[in-house]
Amino acid sequence: MKKGFLAYQLNYPKTDEAWQKMKLTHDFVCIKVGQGKNVDSQLLNNLTKAKQFGLHSFLFWYLDGRYDASAQAETCIKAIENIDPNIMLFVDFEIYGIYKPTHENLNNFFARFVSKNNRLLGIYTNSDSWINGAGNTTNYSSHPLWVADWHNAEPVLFGGWQNWFIWQHKDKDTETGFTAELIQDWNLPTKQVDL
């Protein structure tokens, strides 16, 4: 199993020494692209440092239900247009707090994104968000799943997924923000799967 951590504007290794320390205990990093109308200010820095220190990178966009999902897809596409197209992007779908995206938001984001970009898309979610926010749809089960499940010995799957790609099994870790494991091969196809 491989271990990963999050990197975003408010939580990322701030020095080369900190990145080196993360490299000693982690294999990959999930880097935030942005949320709502905003691109994360540390996106390019985090990608540069991850590459410099030999950490495999994934990207994620936090889908914010307060803003038009198609416009969010456009902002995301523009933010990553010059980033290696082989780096997978996860759409973060969580129904907590004030951000609460809907199933329609998810559909609109995906539709706009795949019409303009062939980067492989995955889904970050948990069972509660998916069942109650996306109606437990199976329409996305061909996309890699990054599942947050920190209550079970193994993730409980939903939405038609037969396996997971990343399992986030802790919500907090003193230095990294979370602990996750990846047990499947990185080398997924880089072509987008149609819904």
Image (cartoon, rainbow, N blue to C red):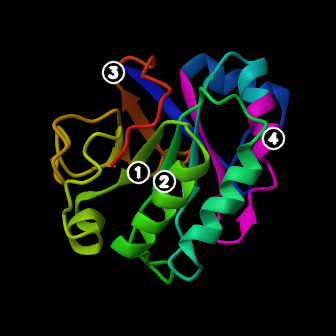
Mark 4 or mark 1: whose residue is earlier in sequence = 4
Q: Is residue 175 visible?
A: no
Q: Give the structural element (helix, strand or loop) at label 4.
A: helix
Q: How crowded is mark 4: few (under 14 residues within 10 Å), some or many (20 or more)?
A: some
- Which of the 4 image quadrants contains residue 73? bottom right
Distance in Å between CA atoms under marks 3 and 2: 19 Å
Under mark 1, the amino acid is Tyr
Mark 2 or mark 1: whose residue is earlier in sequence = 2
Looking at the rendered structure, which numbered label has been put on residue 21?
none
Contact between labelled residues 1 and 2, with CB atoms less than 8 Å apart? yes
* Numbered disc in front, either 2 or 1: 2
Q: Mark 1 points at which residue?
A: 124
Q: What stretch is highlighted in magenta?
A: 27-48
Give whichever of 80, 62 is nearer the camera: 80
Q: Name the residue under label 4.
A: 44
Q: Magenta stretch containing residue 44, yes or no?
A: yes
Q: Name the residue under label 2.
A: 91
Position of residue 75 in the picture relative to residue 128 (left or right)? right
Q: Mark 3 points at which residue?
A: 184
Distance in Å between CA atoms under marks 2 and 1: 6 Å
Distance in Å between CA atoms under marks 4 and 2: 18 Å
Distance in Å between CA atoms under marks 1 and 3: 16 Å
The picture places residue 51, in percent across and down from the top left corner, at 73, 21
Distance in Å between CA atoms under marks 4 and 3: 26 Å
